[in-house]
Image: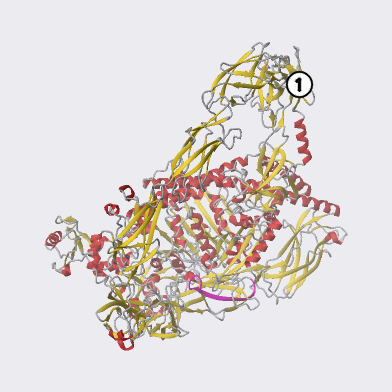
Amino acid sequence: MAAAGGGPGAASAGTAGDGPRTVYLYDRRGKESELGDRALQVAERAGFAGFRASVCQTLGISPEEKFVITTTNRKEITCDNFDETVTDGVTLYLLQSVNQLLLSATKERIDFLPHYDTLVKSGMYEYYASEGQNPLPFALAELIDNSLSATSRNVGIRRIQIKLLFDETQGKPAVAVMDNGRGMTSKQLNNWAVYRLSKFTRQGDFESDHSGYVRPVPVPRSLNSDISYFGVGGKQAVFFVGQSARMISKPADSQDVHELVLSKEDFEKKEKNKEAIYSGYIRNRKPSDSVHITNDDERFLHNVILEEKDKDSFTAVVITGVQPEHILYLKNYFHLWTRQLAHIYHYYIHGPKGNEIRTSKEVGPFNNIDIEISMFEKGKAPKIVNLREIQDDMQTLYINTASDSFEFKAHVEGDGVVEGIIRYHPFLYDRETYPDDPCFPSRLKDDDDDDDCFILEKAARGKRPIFECFWNGRLIPYTSVEDFDWCTPPKKRGLAPIECYNRISGALFTNDKFQVSTNKLTFMDLELKLKDKNTLFTRILNGQEQRMKIDREFALWLKDCHEKYDKQIKFTLFKGIITRPDLPSKKQGPWATYSAIEWDGKIYKAGQLVKTIKTLPLFYGSIVRFFLYGDHDGEVYATGGEVQIAMEPQALYDEIKTVPIAKLDRTVAEKAVRKYVEDEMARLPDRLSVTWPEGDELLPSEIRPAGTPIGALRIEILNKKGEAMQKLPGTSHGGSKKLLVELKVILHSSSGNKEIISHISQHGGKWPYWFKKMENIQKLGNYTLKLQVVLNESNADTYAGRPLPSKAIKFSVKEGKPEKFSFGLLDPPFRVGVPFNIPLEFQDEFGHTSQLAADIQPVLEASGLSLHYEEITKGTNCVIRGVTAKGPVNSCQGKNFNLKVILPGLKEDSQILKIRLLPGPPRRLKVKPDSEILVIENGTAFPFQVEVLDESDNITAQPKLIVHCKFLGAPNLPVYMVDCSSSGTSILTGSAIQVQNIKKDQTLKARIEIPSCRDVLPVEKTIKLLPSSHVAQLQIFSLEGQKAIQIKHQDEVNWIAGDVMRNLIFQMYDEGEREINITSTLAEKIKVNWTPEINKEHLLQGLLPDVQVPASVKDMRYCQVSFQDDHVSLESAFTVRPLPDEPRHLKCELRGGKTVQMGQELPGEVVIIITDQYGNQVPAFSPSTLSALSIAGAGLDNSNVKTALQENSQSISVRGIKFIPGPPGYKDLCFTWREFSDFIRVQLISGPPAKLLLIDWPELKEAIPVINGRELQGPLAVQLCDQWDNPAAVPQVKISLIKASNLKLMPSNQQHKTDEKGRADLGVFVVSAPRGEHTMQVKAIFNKSTIEGPVIKLMILPDPEKPIRLNVKYDRDASFLAGDIFTDFMVSVISEDDSIIKNINPARISMKMWKLSNNVNRPPANAETFSCNKIKDNEKEEGCFYFRDKIIPNKVGTYCIQFGFMMDKANFLNSEQIIVDVLPNQPVKLVPEIQPATPAVSNVRSIASRTLVKDLRLNITDAYGNHTGINLVGTVVATIKDFKEEDADTPLFIGKVRTLEFPFMNGSAEITSLVLAENSPGKDSTEYLIIFEPRLPPLSAALEPYILPFMFYNDVKKQQQMAALTKEKDELSKSIVMYRSLFEASKQLLDEMKCQVEEAKLKEAQLRNELKIHNIDIPTTQQMEHIEALLKRNISEQEELKKKPRRSCTLPNYTKGSGDVLGKIAHLAQIEDDRAAMVISWHLASDMDCVVTLTTDAARRIYDETQGRQQVLPLDSIYKKTLPDWKRPLPHFRNGKLYFKPIGDPVFARDLLTFPDNIEHCETVFGMLLGDTIILDNLDAANHYRKEVVKITHCPTLLTRDGDRIRSNGKFGGLQNKAPPMDKLRGMVFGAPVPKQCRILGEQIDLLQQYRTAVCKLGSVNEDLHGQLQYLHTPDMKKKKQELDEQEKSLKLIEQKLGMTPTRKCNDSARHSTKVDMAECPVPPKRMRREATRQNRRPKGDLAN
């Protein structure tokens, strides 16, 4: 800087009066002047006269000589401006005149030290965060932005050129960006070099490179060219592209060209030589002077500089040292990046409506922007493209595939206005027309593979967001808006189908009120603002804003678009919902099925014959049903679905095919399909011909005996025509199949059909189908011989659902004569004497069942049995009936016998039958014992032995053979029964025979019989019954002395409680009342219930155990004695009732709760009773004994104690117990009566709530200071207390806060209730109130009374950071012309304390402008929004924001301007509205009110044929189409001219004149008619021009005329013929241009795809190499699975590391009120090692709580806020020269060498610190606090180190990891030099940083995610490229090429007929018809290739339509 001298920074430091200055003089008065400069010292306080004299003296010039002294900007130095112009370091010229040419170049010293914003905003944005795209086009866009701003005031063409100079013969590669803008002065060029010197920050002497800047007026789409903004982009872009930049510029009013070179090499050289880096020279020279270019590498600059000659003003940026990868990209991807630029500047190039190819272009201000890109390479023709010619950028595609649009405006809170447009891309028949973006593909494969007709994702738009975002008309590429609430698909079914929401695209247009990043890649806050709840959306209809519900309007518009433009399919006849298991799992369901659809005006139903297209092969068939994916119900519209087709003819194809509905052939007639089916059917086999060459013919329905043979068969297959055939006719989808004949003989039986013979015969070629003789048919039954034609491969007897020909012959086989017999099924069991049958079965020789015809006498034989039978039956069922057998069988199980049956006369005449013969039915009963009289004892049972016998005396058995015995002679006697069903014999017994009260013998009768067998006689016996000798009675006695008292059953006995009943005895008697002696056996059977243990000896003596009487009178004891044996169960029981004992105790009982409130009586009462030793109440009280009761207790208040005798309960009641107030707790009360006493304990609790106290709150004497809008210092908590200040634990008491209405608290004053402890936490309040002292009071409501708490005083201080209003300054006297620039607006935000708020993000300040309508005060949704400009360096006032160069709207009217400040996402602060009137600009051109058609006239008599124009009104407009010139008066002259500018034979107007004049007044000229003269001269079939030229004397400049071309013919007939030919030629021209654009688009797409593949490969390889550096190797197969697994593992590992506990600082940090506060020292640093962290934290313990600020002002503010309690440290008060050098070596190094070898690992303590943020500031803080403090392992190591260091230098403080400290003076030891353990530091300890492994994993995760994206992209672009290559070779494309050739030939012939030369007509077309042709013939962009080519494949082939 010193060497450079001065510069902008220095210039502002001092002026003429401040001290001596040095200036540099160039003498350029003549050629002989010296080339160099002269340095001249200007004395302090010198004036212009003295300065001129010094100049003359220095240069040896006579004082009288005439010359001028000027600045490099040719500003003459005079007395008036000397002081402000001649500053230190300025360069001056000596010239003969101000406008003199520079005879030789000069150098001007400049400085371009970066502005301080370089530091302040360095971390705010990253420049080229490329998001997977190459950022180079966006860098070039920065340079185009500068050029657009520079050319924004151009009247004519705004030309911007990018030249890629890659021709090695002209030097090294370079990129040049040139424009014809206003250029820059040397001062402006100097300013350009200053980094971050934006148009907002230029103040003072910083002269803007946009001098005279005013905010541009609002224009449609904000196309104001105000996009060169921040002072960053141009320089970043230049050094991103290359290493060096040469700026060449010439302003319009200057003679000089200014040139400045910035290069990396130059900076490095200056740094190396220790020169001032940011200084240099600007070369000032004359135009086209390139003598200073001597480097061969830059020889191309000679041509660049040579082009300066004819330019009035310009700027050129020449970048050299271009990066090699950029050169490759620019060459290989030329089409791609030029298309991207065309997308970015689409609306600048094509105007607010965009590139509407279908409509003609309006003449307007946007047709003058000419951005041309050219690339020059060695040996190649230059590539030149104008961005206006690119027709495949995305916006062009969106505009031209849309059928309708929905315009709206969004009014953001404040003044923000966004224009928006939504476009609808309809579904047409079988495809979506939504254009595809190659950068964001929505389809992963070519749509021709559309077997998937349904798309589960977002259909047309895919996953792309709806809106692209434009800022000041220029695309911001990395920001898009997904959607708004009102245009998202509804959750329930809406007006339009859900898929319609995916057919919309959109664009949002903002102005600079929305902040973008400096690189213009992203918006900072657009989506947040738009989605704010206060954002108002309005619809724009016919240019007018409509206030209506935007969501309803949008839904209706979408429904309208769907119904108007979607050519969709209507599904009808709903059948139901199914799942389709044949599909992949994700697509199996639900599917709705339908029987009909309506499509393109036709109805298709189930059963209808159809044909497919685009299937291989083509399918013919009938419709089965239609499928539509989704859960639908009833009729529905959809974009596609699937159809299920049954292939026809079914005889050939038994198949069901499912194809997309789109593949149905809509052109084919059903008759054609039916004829095809019939033709196929006629070729099929029809019948069989069968003959029997060898006899033995089988006749139909013949009955044959078993074994009869069937003869040989000869067979032929015939079709319907009777032709023999051996194979199927060939089908359309496979070769023909051979036919075989299968023979089967089938036996039909009840169990089913069974094949017994099966043969297959094939045709032998020379011999027919043949089957041999069959002789093995022997089985009986019905048979079928079946001949069936089958297929060779599959043996199928049907083909495609239709049976092949067959023939069946039915016959039967019957049995022969009987020759043997067998036994049929017999009916066992066989019993003695019971007849049975023997069935017989007869068989023939094959074993078939036969019948007996002749008489026969069977013979029966069996050993040991007598047998006879009744008869034998004949016929089908032959049976020997009535066979009877008799004889002994020994047992009930029977005996086996062999029964031989002989039938004389048969071949096999005898058979043996094995039978088992069982005993017969019962005949008699046998009973044992045999005696008639039986003796038994009462109570016993008697057994009888019984046997049942048959007629042969065999013991027999049968079911239900039950023997009964009934006893007679006494009541209730038992009945004996026994079941002899199984054995026939058993013991008959039962229960004991018991007769009651028997005292002597008794006689009974027993009758034994079988009830079920009446024919078996009963048996009777006599019984004699004796009395029983068993126990029958049990009695209990109580002995009192010698007397025994009987205790009867269930008696009640009274006894003293707790006593024992002794001397209980018992006695037992038998049935005859005889006493029974107790034996051991009887004693064991006696039980008692009162004790488990019984003394057996006592029982033998008749004694019972003692009974213990219960201690409580409430308990009664039930005593029971029981005896039980096998014969009887006896018991005797009694109850013992206890009686109270003597009084023993006093007992107190507390009724009604154990708690008593302080000052209150105990609720309830104390009841006192007297009890015995067991607690049984004893009645002892009487009225006279009450006085003996006394009560005592600590703190007891006896004043209200009352006692009363309760006679009914014999107790004393005590009430009115109360305690003297004191501390709460438990109290003991002692009750005494006579010698008895008892204690009870009660809890004394606090009294009822009476007070409210604050918890943990400061003293209430002084007001607490609070900044308005900030939080209170802590939570507000209250405690309920009683009147003695004891906490009252009363829950659910309502607590409220009483305050004035102007004191506002957040959260708002809510109802709070106390908790279980009586506390209520009201939370931390944010306080808002006017400045001054305010009070608030906490109150509680308890039992309908109010308890008032203390009054809290708050001192509210104004918030210096809270905005309350906006201050706007501007020139109020300025006038505003349409399309001009607004005056500058300066906006500042004023805080509560009336100061300007600084440190505000400029993006939060915005300006809105809208046209006033109906006095609407609020900005509409379509209001235009602008962002503020960058601050210039001369604008020093901090906190002010400037809106410059904002374009005035180009339409006249009254507009409203309002500025807004976004305080947060939801709140805007608006300024007062500024009303401006926009007036028309200067007149520019003459235009027709309505554009007339091109006339075609002749020179015949008919006036109609000669009329050129009728009723034409011509108006004067300004450059923006505003009607102006109302006050102008003049004429409009119409002249006819030849197209070639030749005047010979030019047609004449009527009257034979060449020109006609028409009056011009009131801003327009009326031309009622313009007619050619009859027989006018003129060449036949020639085009002429009518030029309407305005002549208006008041105007100095000529206006642009209006030109109308017309065709001239010599006669009417030819005129008519030529008109028809002209029309035909126009149609052909349109069609040819469309064809050419299609082929060009296909070629461009192919090149683009190849580039994309290469780029994707490069990206993938680059990322793979980066992964290898991280030791991650990705396999070539299964990449995605491997990547996903790695990502999952790394993310999991990283999460685990983050979850691990780390040391953290628990000291609360200070709230950062502004950017000037860094925070507390404890939070600024982190230390990894625990021991080091402990000792360093302790060493800095006194500073850990200190708050560090950047400025003393901020520190003072914190000091004031905390009343001086908070330590503060301002950084601007630190003397930095004494701070340690962080790179300095440890003291044991001297001159780079080790002085001694230390122990204990010494290291500077500061080197162990890591800083998460603000590294530079933190190094300053800790450098000052720690200095050179060193840390070692232990005290011994530290002492050794200090001892060695002090030998050579001063030793700093030493710390040890064990916690010791040696001060710098050598002192150590003592508590003050020993660190406590870490837990004693109370959280004041430095935290630990995130583990290093966690950071490494984060880098790996980021790389893996990038690599995954790159792999997906590579696969996608490869698939696209393959699909495109296939498409280009389809027959359809070849056909289109042929059609193009034919049409070009036709066009050539028509042009010859019209007499036109093709060359001339091409020029003509270019000159007059460009708009029409381009509108009709788009070049399909990349995202729409497939859609366009599909359109061109339509059967009609009519491209023109």
Q: Is residue 813 a member of the stretch shown in magenta?
A: no
- The picture quadrant where one finds residue 905 is top right
Q: Position of residue 1349 (x, y in %)?
A: 39, 84
Residue 1984 screen position, x and y as percent: 62, 50
Q: Residue at x 58, y 48 (%)?
A: 443
Q: Amino acid at mark 1?
A: Ala
- Taking the image as drawn, is residue 1447 in sight? yes
Q: Nearer the viewer, residue 1126 or 1970?
A: 1126
- Residue found at the very far right of the displayed protein: 1501
- Above or below, 60 against 292 in this view is below
Q: 339 and 478: which one is in front? A: 478
Q: Which residue is mark 1?
A: 724
Quadrant of the image containing the N terminus: bottom left
As displayed, is residue 1142 above or below residue 832? below
Q: Say whether residue 360 is visible.
A: no
Looking at the image, residue 731 sits to the left or right of residue 1666; the answer is: right
Q: Which of the 4 image quarters holds residue 1612?
A: bottom right
- Residue 226 vs residue 1823: left or right? right
Which residue ends up furthest to the bottom in the rendered image?
A: 1199
The residue segment tinted magenta is 1451-1467
Work out whether residue 330 or residue 1672 is closer to the camera in this orientation and state it: 1672
Q: Return the residue nearer the eye: 830 or 1363.
A: 830
**Residue extending farthest front:** 1000
Total numbered badges shown on the rendered structure: 1
Chosen colour scheme = secondary structure
Horizontally, is 971 left or right of 1075 in the view? right
